[in-house]
Image (spheres, rainbow, N blue to C red):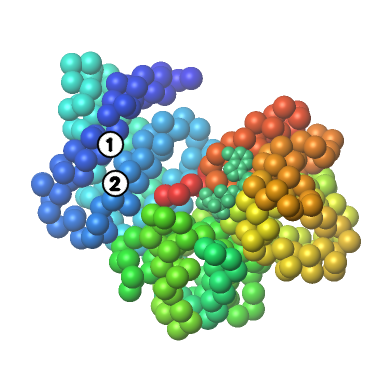
Amino acid sequence: MSDLQRLLKESWTLVEEQQDKLSGYFYARIFLNHPHLRELFPVTMDVQRARLLGAIVTAVQTVDDPDRFDEYLRALGRDHRKFHVTPDQYEVIGSALIESLRAFARDEWTPEYDQAWRDAYDVIARKMLAGAEADPNPPWWHAEVVRHERRSRDIGVITVRPLGSLEFRPGQYLSVECPQYHPRVWRTYSIANAPREDGSFDLHVRALGAGWVSGALVRRSKVGDLLRVAAPMGSMTLNRRSAHDIVMVAGGTGLAPIKSLIEELATFNRTRWVHVFIGARDRDDLYDLPALQRMAAAYPWLQLVPVCSADPGWGGEEGLISEAVTRFGPWQEHDFYVSGSPPMVRSTLRSLTELQVSSMRIRYDAFSEH
Ligand SMILES: NC(=O)C1=CN([C@@H]2O[C@H](COP(=O)(O)OP(=O)(O)OC[C@H]3O[C@@H](n4cnc5c(N)ncnc54)[C@H](O)[C@@H]3O)[C@@H](O)[C@H]2O)C=CC1
């Protein structure tokens, strides 16, 4: 660990337990000194509260992983254009961050810590701004809902068509806003198909308690609505150069990017066996199984293993998806693609480590409920 990283981690432990209060203080500082910035944020701050600060802290703590984070931060910068963030606003946010840390760490805060956070934040802001400036795309596109299907109690498959050309790679995700229902609240979703002629794409959405955008997409949006979508991001794309067989592990709506990768493979694959583990709580949540079964019938290289974690009468594979993967194998020579909730991804990565799958062979996105 470098000195910078050590200082950042060490100083964060001084305030970590007061995160909620620190976050409140951080926004209060921003809005008090710069009331016009309030317009960048959603009307109700509940959803937003942990987001910006959380994203900055994660980025700062990982500033030493240049390869992975260079592209990540550039993409984040491109993505933030949808908020119309200007360079001077990056400065305002950086100062509020340092002031909040100082206020909460009190006497234990040192000039060294101060400098470490300034340096790290500068790197992040510079990379994000560079990413934003270099992007030839618009900050966001309007996209029309062209199809809306309820697949289970709370899961919807929503097809949208951007007005204008929007390029993406299978496996990527993008931010979506429903301006008519929740203005300025953006939420990320993976694209669930390979690129199509007409530019349309599917989103798999689960509406859960506090999931505002997800709730609006599943329960309120309808054909003809205009959404806004921002530039695609993410690095869980297919490694086309590899000749290894593949295992894909999808938890819940984490199936979306996996389906997109399968569709890409379908355009050229002849030689690589592909096992797909699909985890769901119960049969009702295996919301896309018929479509996948049709694909498995069409492509001899594709094998599906649906797994239910809470459905006693289900006669198929049972348990958590991470456990199911370990019951099959051996997998040391396979490439892995993992997608689902952060705990599901973590436990799958743990299982793969135990199975001695090299981390070089595993692709996933640190995709969470932002
Ligand atoms: N690109 C990506 O990585 C994407 C990630 N997601 C995320 O996937 C999640 C999907 O949520 P739901 O549909 O509600 O899934 P869910 O919570 O119903 O989980 C589905 C299955 O995942 C497995 N699972 C869940 N928690 C686990 C754990 N702690 N350990 C091992 N296995 C576990 C179980 O097999 C479970 O049946 C969301 O958090 C969403 O943000 C969604 C789309 C794309």
Q: Is residue 364 above or below residue 61?
A: below
Asked whether residue 90 appears in the rendered view, the answer is yes
Q: Quadrant of residue 295?
A: bottom right
Q: Is residue 107 above or below residue 25?
A: above
**Distance of label 1 from label 2 (alpha carbons):** 8 Å
Front residue of 326/6: it is: 326
- Which residue is found at the position 24% from the left and 44% from the top? 93
* Mark 2: few/some/many CA within 10 Å (<14, 14-19, 20+): some
Residue 10 place in picture, x, y as percent: 36, 19
Q: Where does label 1 land, which residue? A: 20
Residue 38 place in picture, x, y as percent: 19, 56
- Which residue is found at the position 77% from the left and 47% from the top? 317
**Is label 1 in contact with label 2 (beta carbons under 8 Å)?**
yes
* Three-letter residue code for mark 1: Asp
* Three-letter residue code for mark 2: Arg
- Which residue is found at the position 60% from the left and 80% from the top? 198
